[in-house]
Amino acid sequence: MTTSTRLPLPPSLYADTAVEATPTPPLTSDKTVPVAIIGGGFTGLSTALHLAEQGVLATVLEAQEPGWGASGNNGGQTNPGLKHDPDQIEQDFGTELGRRMIAFSYGNTNFTHDLIRRYQIPCEARQNGTLRAAYNEASAAAIATTAKQCIRRGMPVKLLNAAELREMTGSDRYLCAMLDARGGDLHPLSYARGLARAAIGAGVA
């Protein structure tokens, strides 16, 4: 895994509290590799790691350091699903492709947290669910529709009413919420650095 002359990380809580980065020396000469991956964010690092698991050792080229950009500076939430409801996805893309997209997008959090556990990535990860809360009647109707479609498909989703939500959060601001047990959160910069460490340990350059 190689970097060029790098800029310092922008000041942030994540930069101040992340685990230590694994050294990534710069590329100093021409190199022929089976796979070159441009960018050391979540996508590039995960791709390199999973290729290594299949015996393909990639080289990751990163201008700064792993997680320097958006991957290491986001909200850190691991949210299942897509913007549109499952029924809409199947309607737009057809039943077969739609179901694959739903399985992939709603299963992404399990995939992420399983990867964290498998490689023991220290990134303050918690998989204790996420809430999509409704603040008005329109959003309440939309969230109820999404929850019912997810429940119909056997997903670990529950629709909470205002009283249940108040007991859980201490706030009476919201009308209802969809609780998805697969969601969670993590420290994004530590996760990126942990992916880099795991990839390097698997033989990625």
Image (spheres, rainbow, N blue to C red):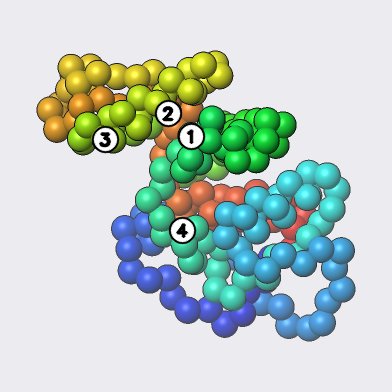
Residue drawn at x 37%, y 57% is: 14
The reply to whether dot 3 and dot 2 touch (C-beta < 8 Å) is no
| Pointer 3 residue | 138
Task: State the mark number for residue 85.
Answer: 1
Above/below status of 5 relative to 23: below
Marked residue nearer the N-terminal end (1 or 4): 4
Label number found at residue 182? none
The answer to whether the residue labelled 2 contacts the one labelled 1, judged by CB atoms less than 8 Å apart, is yes
Marked residue nearer the N-terminal end (3 or 1):
1
Q: Is residue 79 above or below residue 147?
A: below
Q: Secondary structure at mark 1?
A: loop
> Marks 1 and 4: CB-CB under 8 Å?
no
Residue depicted at x 78% and y 49% = 52
The location of residue 103, given as percent across then percent down, is 62, 31
Quickly name the residue at label 2.
146
**Element at badge 3?**
helix
Q: CA distance from mark 4 to mark 3?
A: 34 Å
Q: Secondary structure at mark 4?
A: helix
Residue position marked by numbered label 4 in the rendering: 72
Left or right: 160 with respect to 73? left
Q: Between residue 102 and residue 89, name the one nearer to us.
A: 89
Q: Earlier in the sequence, mark 3 or mark 2?
A: 3
Quadrant in which the N terminus is drawn:
bottom right
Residues 190 and 136: in front is 136
Residue type indicated by callout 2: Thr
Question: Circles 2 and 4: CB distance less than 8 Å?
Answer: no
